[in-house]
Structure formats: structure tokens, C-alpha cells
Image (cartoon, rainbow, N blue to C red):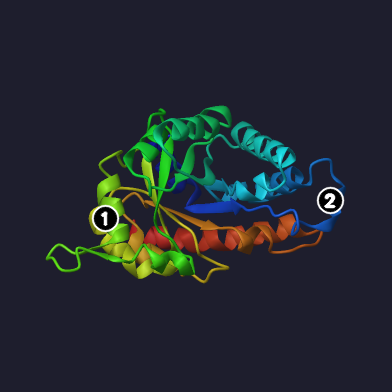
Amino acid sequence: MTKKELVENIKRKKSFLCIGLDSDINKIPAHLLQSEDPVFEFNKQIIDATREYCVSYKPNTAFYETQGAKGWISLEKTIGYLNKTCPDIFTIADAKRGDIGNTSTMYAQAFLEKLNFDSVTVAPYMGEDSVKPFLEFQNKWAIVLALTSNKGAHDFQTIMINAEMENQNFLYQEVIEKSMQWGTSQNMMYVVGATRAEMLSDIRSIIPDHFLLVPGVGAQGGSLADVAKYGMNKECGLLVNSSRGIIFASSGNDFADKAREEAQKLQTEMQVLLENYL
């Protein structure tokens, strides 16, 4: 998917919502466990109920890999269903891959060619040759981890670099400034946690035109209004993710209806924010 297509879909749907398909087999409604493929059936019903209100879905691959080959089949069926029924949806393989060049090439081929996701989340710790293979596919994206929303983010990401010099940077700023040279705003996004919303202004000063994937809204306590205030650019430039708050809004037979209600609530709030800032 191109950047233009993504922006047009955001404007058409009046939404920049990404729904995380963190489909934990231990949390999906019990009545689905009788299905041939409970995880795929859960995902299918969530997608059917919420696709009107979002522009992106993000399966976290860990929830599928933990089920072995069976889980990988569920993931394949999920992305196949999305690509067939929702071709306008931006798909994210939340795999957080990153390794030496030839291994990254294999990861990139697995997710961007074989499974045909639009994008993959990538850990940049090993540097340029671990990220660039993901940028070599037409109309595909690498989403680079920059400033995450977890508690342990402070262990490394906010360490001050060049502390004794005039040009001081946090490590996450150094990561952004260096990695932005590897790709463009047409094929690279960055992960910035919603619980770090006040730092978005500084990030925007470095990458004014890139899209940001923002987790942490909802169950993790991030503020959607703050994310829009500090992070939105002239094209919106945001994909705000909610996972548990939507897909596990109910554990009963009404789980899909409740997920739809939660997705609609966020889309309604996003519509107002888009009208205010664009």
C-alpha cells in the first residue's frame, strides 16, 4: 500500500484506528473453542464487526507462534482474509524482527512476500543492514521501533548520548536521526508509544512527514487527544493502535458486537480530532 492510499483511506473513513489482533487463545470466548480454528474464527468475527471503523489491523505474531504450526496457519488465514475482503486495510505484521542482512532478507520475504503483509515492525538495534532488506519491496513498509510504551523503555531508549557535549541526544532520537537516512516517509514508519505523547513534538521536529504507529491507547492508559495534539501532521501521520480494549471488550457471545462498539467510540473521537487539526 502506498502512503497516498493510506492517507486517502484515513480521510474517507475519518479514522486513524489500528486494531491489534493479539488473539490470545486463553482469552477468546469459550464458545469459539469448538471451532475448527478458534483463533481465525475469532479474528474473522472481529474483522467483520470493526472494519468499518479502522484503517489498519496488526496481528502480533507472538500470539500465533506460541501455538506452533497451527498458530501459523491461523495467521496465514487471517492475513488472507484481510487481503481478500478488506484490500483497503493497511496490514502490519507485529513481529519486531531484525537480524544480520541475509537473515533479515528472509524475514522480509516471509512477511512481505509469502504472507503479503503491507508492513513489518523492525528492531533497529543491529543497525542499517538489519533494516534495509525490509525497505526493498515496492509499496511495503518497515515500522522501526523508536520510543516504546513499556516500563523497560527507560533502560536504553532515554539514555542521553553525548552527555558531555553540546549536541546531546536521547538514544531514541539518535535511532530516528540515523535510520531516517535508510528509507523515506514513503516506506518507513516509527513506533512511538502513546504513554510518551509529550515527546511527540520533539519527534515531529525530526521526522515531520513520517507516519507514526502509536500503541498504548486504551488499556495502557495513553491519551488519544494528547497523541493527536503533539503527533498529528498535515496528512494525519498517525496510526493509533488499540488491542485489548477492543478485541476483548467482552468474553461472551456478544464479543464482536462489543468490539464494534469500542471501535466506533474511538473512530468518533478520531473524526473530531481530524476535523480539529487538519
Residue 212 against residue 76 in the figure, above or below: below
Residue 250, given in percent of the width and then of the height, sits at 73, 64
Which residue is drawn at the image coordinates 76% and 58% (left, top)? Answer: 26
Which residue is drawn at the image coordinates 74% and 53% (left, top)? Answer: 25
Helix, strand, or loop for circle 1?
helix
Q: Quadrant of residue 262?
A: bottom right
Residue 60, given in percent of the width and then of the height, sits at 59, 49
Q: Quadrant of the C terminus?
A: bottom left
Residue 66 against residue 197 in the figure, above or below: above
Position of 268 with respect to 21 (left or right) is: left
Residue 112, given in percent of the width and then of the height, sits at 50, 32
- Give the amino acid type for the residue marked by disc 2 in the picture: Leu
Q: Is residue 89 visible?
A: yes
Along the line of sight, the residue nearer the viewer: 127 or 229:
127
Q: Which residue is mark 2?
A: 33
Q: In this rendering, which labeled residue sits more in front, label 2 or label 1? A: 1
Q: Which residue is mark 1?
A: 174
Which residue is drawn at the image coordinates 62% and 49% (left, top)? Answer: 62
Crowding near pointer 1: few (<14 within 10 Å), some, many (20+)? some
Mark earlier in primary sequence (2, 1): 2
Position of 259 with respect to 167 (left or right) is: right
Helix, strand, or loop for circle 2?
helix
Q: Quadrant of the N terminus?
A: top left
Residue 259, given in percent of the width and then of the height, sits at 67, 58
Residue 243 against residue 152 in the figure, above or below: above
Q: Is residue 15 visible?
A: no
Crowding near pointer 2: few (<14 within 10 Å), some, many (20+)? some
Distance of mark 2 from mark 1, alpha carbons? 46 Å
- Give the amino acid type for the residue marked by disc 1 in the picture: Glu
Which residue is drawn at the image coordinates 76% and 44% (left, top)? Answer: 41
